[in-house]
Amino acid sequence: MKLMRIVRMTVLASALGLDTCVLQAQETNEVEQLKRQLQQMQENFERSQREHRQQMEGLTQKLDALARQQRAGATVAVATAQSPPPADAESWRPTDPIRVGKGSAYMDIGLVGTFAVGGSTADDIEAGTQLGGHDPNQRGFTVQGVELNLQGAIDPYFRGNANVLFSIDSEGESFVELEEAWLETVSLPGNVQVRAGQLLTEFGRVNTQHPHSWSFVDSPLVNARFLGPDGLRNPGARISWLSPTPFYSEFFLGVQNSHGETATSFRSSGHSHGNEEDEEALPFAYRHPDNDRGVEGIGDLLFTPRLAMSFDVTENQVLLLGASAAFGPNSSGMTGDTATQIYGLDVTWKWKSPNAHAGFPFVMWQTEGMLRRYEAGTFDWSEEATDDDNNTFLDEGVLVDVSGAAPAVLSRETLTDYGFYSQFLYGFRKGWVAGLRFDYVTGERGDYEQAGLLLADNAGGGEPAGRDPFRNQRWRLSPNLTWYPSEFSKIRLQYNYDDRSDIGDDHSVWLQFEFLLGAHAAHKF
């Protein structure tokens, strides 16, 4: 009996031990199963967040596209954020819009100040390395521009915009210029829009931008050389049509005056080497401009067509393509029947992270190329050859033939120039953008540059005129780093390495700082 009792107890203990192991194994499996369920739920939650974020961004893009369609003429734009109108005087901040009026007739007031400090190894900063009218123009400090912007609704049919710029040149002289002032329709049928007044010409990507919206301290070389130090702008009108395609596609046609200092390459007052007051400097194409007739007919106007398109490559990538042209007379030669043609292509690609916050991180690449065909007219330098000193030789500053004995006579010819810039921007974290730009400009050698002409030196001799510095080969490399403490301020550090044929290499460093008060017009993407 004892033996039987011992056997039973042993069997019972074994059974209890086995049950305990089974229970422990079940508990372990249940814990592992719960862990897997929790991990799966976390993954589903994160995936759902990403999908909702992408859906929200997609809806935002669609709303923006519908807004552009309804505006019937707005460009593809990623507008810089603007603060809402102040609710009352107590809640107003310096960065809030200053609004005059309300309802269908109001005006927002904004002010942008852009300044630079730095230096360069170049001796000809303003007229040599820095071609743009709003580039840093001297060692030390430069007031690149203090711009007053007025924008708003005129009535239910028109809106208006004006940009008035104050600046100081390298001689310390202050000046004020009207960059833009126009009215624009808001309710024409058929996706048509008309703008009229003082206009920045719709050509390429940079020409329509004000200096404070540039991605670099200075303007690209090709823009400054072909379209002018202050950009191509003049009084006129522009009509645009937003086509009803599944992607953004808009056609522009501008008609403007072709004369004045803001119509470089057309009937402008011309360039000169070095200081504009230097009477001995040679003008562009070695021909003094004749710009006295004003507008006598339609042939004296400037015509600028442009086509701009945008495509969503993926949910996070956008591609913009543009083609531009400008046709008008120029002021070269003695006959006044010469013309200029400029053609341009631009490509912009932007990627934004699906997890972007406030637009960061992002990558953006932009390239713009231009080709100019300039008809240079016949010019006789005897018109400039006056012997003020009663000498037997030609006065200083007169272009003479290879013997140096007689004023030069330049024949009619067509000059071809081309250039481009390519820039890369990387917004690697909120408020921080690293950039790199490469510029290149050159021109095919003209007959007047190969004729061995001399520039009289008032001593019976002369120096070879050589290549035209306004058409000679040049390239520049510009890395920079920009910090945006907020959407209302900016600090940018930029280095320029310049290589100019027949002149040499130069190094420049510029620190730019900028602030915004009040409202300002939206900037194009």
Image: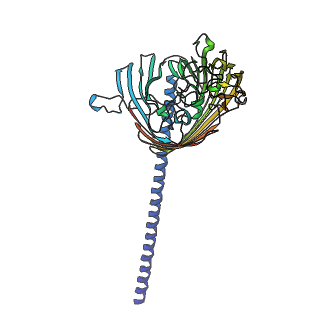
In terms of depth relative to the viewer, which is nearer, 397 or 62?
397
Left or right: where 378 falls relative to 347: right
Rendered view: 493 above or below 180: below
Q: Say whether residue 324 is visible.
A: no
Is residue 434 or residue 269 the one in the foreground?
A: 269
Q: Is residue 49 left or right of residue 396?
A: left
Q: Which of 236 and 252 is in front in this view?
A: 236
Q: In this view, does 514 lie to the left or right of 335?
A: left
Q: Quarter of the image holding residue 80?
A: top left
Q: Where is residue 394 in the image (x, y as percent from the top left)?
A: 65, 23
Q: Where does residue 228 sit, x and y in percent of width and height?
A: 56, 27
Which residue shows up at 42% across the image and 17% down it? 154
Is the N terminus in the top left, top right, bottom left or bottom right quadrant? Answer: bottom left
383 is higher (above) or lower (below) than 320: above
Residue drawn at (45%, 44%), measured in percent from left and top? 430
Question: Which of the two residues, 122 or 483, is positioned nearer the viewer here?
Answer: 122
Report the residue at 35% width, 31% height from top: 96
Q: Position of residue 93 (x, y in %)?
A: 32, 33
Residue positioned 55% across, 37% down in the render: 129
Q: Is residue 486 left or right of residue 369?
A: left
Residue furthest front in the image: 391
At which x and y percent is residue 508? 52, 42
Picture layout, residue 336 above or below residue 130: above
Q: Is residue 10 above or below residue 62?
A: below
